[in-house]
Image: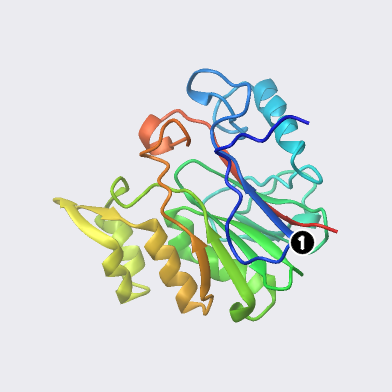
Amino acid sequence: MPNRPEDWIVPDWAAPQRVRALITSRNGGVGTGPYASMNLGLRVDDDPHTVAANRRLLKHFLPAEPRWLEQVHGTTVVDAQSVTHPVAADASIAKNPGCVSVVTVADCLPILFAERTGKVVAAAHAGWRGLAAGIIENTIRALETSPQNLLAYLGPAIGPSAFEVGDEVRDAFVAVDRAAINAFHPHKPGKWLADLFMLARQRLAKADVLNVYGGGLCTYSNPARFFSHRRDKVSGRMAALIWIED
């Protein structure tokens, strides 16, 4: 078995031992050019044979092939066990041991969820559109447990010093929760710097998920470690994965 790259992330949180999670970096694969080296996304115009090779490398660290999704910046949540080929969804839950939930990211925020006794887990893809529309709330409902029993981990995403957005993004959040105004800072006329981590924490807190970990790792400002679509325009995708062990 190959060694896991040192800059991959193993979440530091209070999840039970039977819950395992992993977030890849851009390193550890065989890709070249803007996709160097561990691109795991099939929809970014990379060579599919290279992506397949990277996915085989990833599988060395997992109990099974991940249940890949076709992410659409929406709010659909599926049961990973039912995913036999990529379906249009932006989150999945897993109750069966060995079933791997996964989302891919390159600036959007990956959020991992675990029930505190380890009976169910989830992975969610939270770009601003999905976050504003309710991907967090839909994932929590799909987990079918009290929100107070959940732990959440915020993976790497574009940070608050780099995520420039327009008025329409700010308005979409503030229309739902006035407190969201604190996550936007004036940048230039009609433009704001948005804090995805704060927006996610606000949504989680409003949903009564109080045990929240991670957050703060910026994809945009660390090109040696992370892919960033906003920074590079052409880029690969990293994966955030979670599963329950037997």
Question: Considering only vertical position in the picture, is 40 above or below 145?
Answer: above
Q: Secondary structure at mark 1?
A: loop
Outermost residue toward the right? 246
Identify the residue at image location x=51%, y=63%: 213
Viewer-proximal residue among 65 and 28: 28
What residue is shown with label 1? 18
Classify residue 20 by image quadrant: bottom right
Q: Position of residue 178 (x, y in %)?
A: 30, 75
Q: Position of residue 22 (x, y in %)?
A: 64, 48
Identify the residue at image location x=54%, y=56%: 74
Question: Considering only vertical position in the picture, is 46 above or below 191?
Answer: above
Left or right: residue 230 compared with residue 138: left
Classify residue 169 by image quadrant: bottom left
Amino acid, disc 1: Arg
Classify residue 60 by image quadrant: top right
Left or right: residue 197 compared with residue 25: left
Q: Residues within 10 Å of mark 1 (few under 14, many from 20)?
A: some
Q: Position of residue 135 (x, y in %)?
A: 54, 63
Left or right: residue 24 compared with residue 183: right
Which quarter shows the N terminus? top right
Q: Position of residue 148 (x, y in %)?
A: 59, 80
Which quarter shows the C terminus? bottom right
